[in-house]
Amino acid sequence: MLEIDVNSMGPEALQGALDVARGRRNGEPVMPSAELLGLLEGAIECGASDLHLVPGYPATYRVHGEMRVAGADAGSAEHPAGAEGEQIGAGARARRAAGRQGGRAGKAAVLDPAQTRDMVESLVPERSRRLLEQSKNLDCSVSVMHKGVPCRFRASVYLSQGDWCACLRYIPNEIPSLEWLGISEELAQRLVAHRNGLVIITGVTGSGKTATLAALVKLLRQDASHRVITIEEPIEYIHTPGTGGIVTQREVGRDVPSYERGLRDCLREDPNVILVGEIRDRETAQMALSAAETGHLILTTLHTRDAKGALSRFVDIFPQEAQDDVRSQLAMSLRSVVCQHLLPSTDESGKRVLALEVLHVNQAVQVAIRTGKIEMIESAIQTGKREGMIVLDDDLQRLVKAGRITAETARDYAKDPAAILGSGRTW
């Protein structure tokens, strides 16, 4: 059974389930694709983080950071042998049961544009399809019942050379714990202890930024005095009503027209913490700075490879003539930047390991931001270790010493590879 919910699974999830049971969603017929259902079930069974649907390629999973063809048999050349391959084989069987006609044994069939379009249309109703054709991109969510348990995916639907494509990311039902993520309680408490200002979680795509924000909101809820408003596109982790602080989740496109408008409106809704899923444009960045200056704690994300890159990216959103003023505002409002890297693990489970670079703003950092001398940030982190800052290479060395990653992996991600000690799996 596939539940289609372009507007995400928010507080109206129960009503949405009833709508699907009646065969309708927002007044439109729901016609889920059996082929898509099989692929999503396969993704769940093999522990995939993402499912990619692109014409000209087989349906492909990302499992522990590696791309795996969904329809290949476990022992084929397109799959490494072992537990993961066997699980993916189970997903392929689910697809075949759903009616998928594959190629020869051990080789998955390539998707053609019509197949991909059929699957995309099954998760995008007609009204949103028109929006997709206008904007060329649409974020939505889909929920599938697997073995009696609802499993959610975030879908990014887009056009490529005139053909429809999709990337669906699995969203765990449970908000991960700080320990599972690899974030210390001390660091998390420090991030949420700020009474105001801007906290940025940064990293490349797929580095766990959204999960970290969700875990921080969960931590904030332990204090009943907190009023948290999130603005997301789409809503991913759901904070169900319960004891502790009040959390209101608003989705861009359903509850608010844009991040900027959501930020502007929520200032009238008595928040003391505001989560902005991502800062993408000048208007959102300016509103985030303004909200931070007026006594709110802003939690948000950027896509960069390190902490200093986050500062440069934030400033560069603005035109040249405004950047001096923005640097002054950012120097006063920024509290912390956490840059995340998910690394291949030595653990047989394949679960990736989190390495961090952490910047906390002190006087030296404020001067570097205000004067535009971003190159000084690296030395500020190095000299700020006693203040709780973390140098990426130090964290990589810690993981090598603990046997959680290899020295080769650490060198691949290190800013100074020659400084990483050890060889292979040894310290």
Image: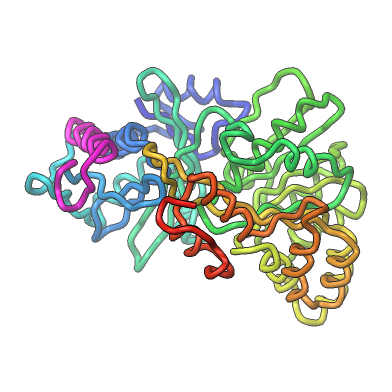
What residue appears at the point 32 percent right and 36 percent down from the top-left corner? 46
Image quarter for residue 159?
Answer: bottom left
Above or below — where is 323 with respect to 390? Answer: below
Q: Main secondary structure of the magenta part?
A: helix
What's drawn in magenta, residue-wise?
A: 74-98
Colour convention: rainbow
State the image coordinates of residue 243 (x, y, percent, origin top left).
75, 18
Above or below — where is 214 with respect to 261? Answer: above
Foreground residue, 19 or 74?
74
Confirm whether residue 301 shows in the render.
no
Q: Quadrant of the N terminus?
A: top left
In the displayed structure, does residue 351 sit left or right of residue 210? left
What residue appears at the point 23 percent right and 48 percent down from the top-left corner? 80
Give yes or no for residue 94 being in the magenta stretch: yes
| Number of disc labels | 0
In the displayed structure, does residue 227 sit left or right of residue 139? right
State the image coordinates of residue 334 (x, y, percent, origin top left).
82, 58
Give yes or no for residue 195 being in the magenta stretch: no
State the image coordinates of residue 85 (x, y, percent, origin top left).
24, 40
What residue appears at the point 41 percent right and 45 percent down from the top-left corner? 346
State the image coordinates of residue 169 (x, y, percent, origin top left).
45, 44
What residue appears at the point 13 percent right and 50 percent down from the top-left corner? 107
Confirm whether residue 392 shows in the render.
yes
